[in-house]
Amino acid sequence: MMKKTAIVTGGSRGIGYAIAKQLGQDGCQVVIFATGRKETYQEALDGLTELGLDCHYVQGSIDNPKSREMLVKETLEHFGRIDILINNAGVAPKERRDLLEMTEESFDRVVGINTKGTLFLTQLVANQMIHQEQVFACKGHIVNVGSCSATVSSTSRGEYCISKAAVSMLTTLYADRLASEGIIVNEVRPGVIATDMTSVVTEKYDKMIADGVFPLARWGKAEDVANMVSLFCSDKVLYTTGNHVDVDGGFHIRRL
């Protein structure tokens, strides 16, 4: 039986790794795309292989056009088609700085990876999905991993908020453009998830959880996000496009 092929950007650790693992367990062939050398993540990759999952690793950076082209080329050479794209790769500012002190260099880096890279990789993959033979219930699923920061202000990392707000518009734009092509586009918006990115502000979020800011009073897990992505990529979601789901423990709820 033919398997779906999924690309997971930023899939070597954290949320991306959990997504890659879950999609593999769902029966997909998975291509993991990340910036580091394969040897750096060998233990994690071996963990997937030991589970019997069919994975391929591609090194590159999503903000580099040649890397994006290589990713698609290697995926097609290795598995023959692309059925799922998970746009998970993203970075936070190297240094949290007040909005009035944000540098253009930091802005360009964050937006170049989180927004521009996502935009143009999706363009490449969507064109491949359109032109390949449809053998599953739809021509493809694209899921963007956004953030609660798309709508929640953090003035010490404005470039990240801007980049994720833009990703939400990419979800809308691509869902609109690709619906007639049989490609479904949705978004998950993680809240406070225990990853390397949030490890530098553990004390802050521990206090917020203790103070009841999050209705479900715990840290989110990478698996919480992966499970929602899994649902979006399944044949159970064939009449929903352009939507987002908050995976944030209810943080988005406005309360008096």
Image: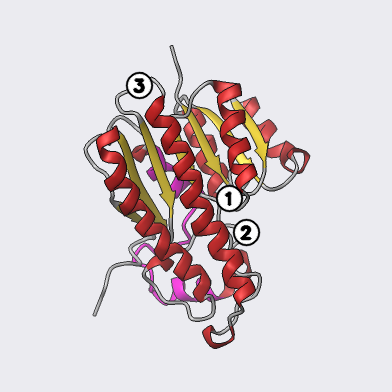
Location of the N terminus (image quadrant): top left
Does label 3 or label 1 sit earlier along the sequence? 1
Confirm or deny contact between disc 2 and disc 1 (CB under 8 A): yes
Horizontally, residue 113 falls left or right of residue 147, namely right
Farthest left residue? Answer: 239
Q: Residue at x 38, y 52 (%)?
A: 188
Residue 246 point in image, percent of width and height: 34, 57
Farthest right residue? Answer: 39
Confirm or deny contact between disc 3 and disc 2 (CB under 8 A): no
Residue 136 visible from this viewpoint: yes
Horizontally, residue 239 falls left or right of residue 141, namely left
Residue 111 point in image, percent of width and height: 53, 64
Does label 2 or label 1 sit earlier along the sequence? 1
110 or 252, nearer to the observer:
110
At mark 1, the secondary structure is helix
Residue 14's tag is 1
Residue 242 point in image, percent of width and height: 28, 49
Horizontally, residue 193 falls left or right of residue 142, namely right
Residue 134's tag is 3
Neighbours of disc 1 within 10 Å: few (<14), some (14-19), many (20+):
some
Q: How is the image coloured?
A: secondary structure
Q: Would you name the residue on which mark 2 appears?
A: 196
48 or 125, nearer to the observer:
125
Q: Residue at x 35, y 38 (%)?
A: 231
Residue 136's tag is none
The total of numbered circles placed on residues is: 3
**Disc 3 and disc 2: Cα gap in Å?**
38 Å
Farthest bottom residue? Answer: 100
* Residue type for callout 2: Asp
Q: Residue at x 49, y 32 (%)?
A: 6
